[in-house]
Image (cartoon, helix red, strand yellow):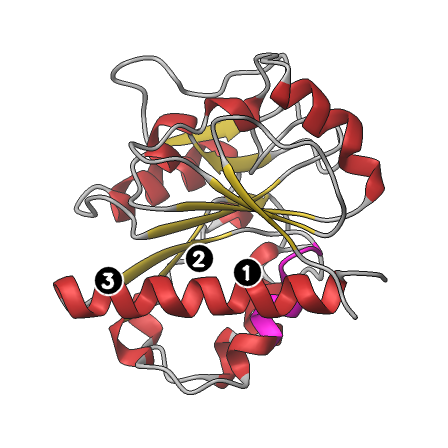
Amino acid sequence: MQGRPALDRAAAASILAAADRAILARGQFHLVLAGGDTPRGAYRKLRETPADWPAWHIYFGDERCLPANDPARNSLMAGQAWLDHVAIPAPQRHSIPAELGPTQAAEAYAGILRPVGKFDLVLLGLGEDGHTASLFPGREWGTAPGSPDTLAVFDAPKPPRERVSLTAARLSRAREVLFLVEGESKRAAVGRWRAGEQLPARAIRPATDVDVLVTSALLLPPFGRFSLVKDG
């Protein structure tokens, strides 16, 4: 797929650079992972790269309420592609226990996040409908003051319907946010984002601009910084 290897390399390099900055400044790196297929190649690149793994703390932006060993679980994908092969201590890998069901899992993960301040880096994807994590158009996103850190999702418009997601407010509490956008199928969503439509992706508003890596010449939101990556 044109541009995909370059996206993987650029994303991995961005993650490692953010880790270096965080560890130098605070001795730890708190990273929120995106799910789905787009970040898989970047995770494989990280697996091949030496890093100060014991300083890394891993969280997930969302998870599907499926058995822990289901191939569609974000935690399983990240583990197989990367996390199971590096020396990040197990207590610092914070999977969402979505097999417990939306309500119980959201409550449990909120407890895990409670002592965590700002994330150092949040990775996010973009759906064709403008969703990010498991925050979908026409649903609750958790943007209001005092919103909880997590949401129990019962009516996702794509299967599985039951999920757990970090809220827009919690995802925005980050020093850096990086969107990975791959494929022409996302063009319409990016255009709507740029036009100012209130999509879930637009609700992620850290103190600094979001950064976006894309694999084709998509029009990107004016409030973000983007890099076009392509092979050749």
Residue type, mark 2 in image = Ser
First in sequence: mark 2 vs mark 3: 3
Q: Mark 2 highlights which residue?
A: 95
First in sequence: mark 2 vs mark 1: 1
Q: Quadrant of residue 104?
A: top left
* Main secondary structure found in the magenta portion: helix
Measure the C-alpha gap from mark 2 to mark 1.
6 Å
SS for callout 1: helix
| Residue 86: assigned label | none
Left or right placement of residue 142 versus residue 10 in this view: left
| Residue 22: assigned label | 3
Q: Are marks 3 and 1 in contact (CB under 8 Å)?
A: no
Q: Position of residue 3 (x, y in %)?
A: 77, 61
Q: Is residue 93 above or below residue 190?
A: below
Q: Position of residue 181 (x, y in %)?
A: 67, 45
Residue appearing at x 51%, y 34% in the figure: 102
Q: Mark 1 highlights which residue?
A: 75
Residue type, mark 3 in image = Ala
Residue appearing at x 36%, y 46% in the figure: 176
In the image, which residues are magenta? 37-44
Question: Which quadrant, please, contains the C terminus?
Answer: bottom right
First in sequence: mark 3 vs mark 1: 3
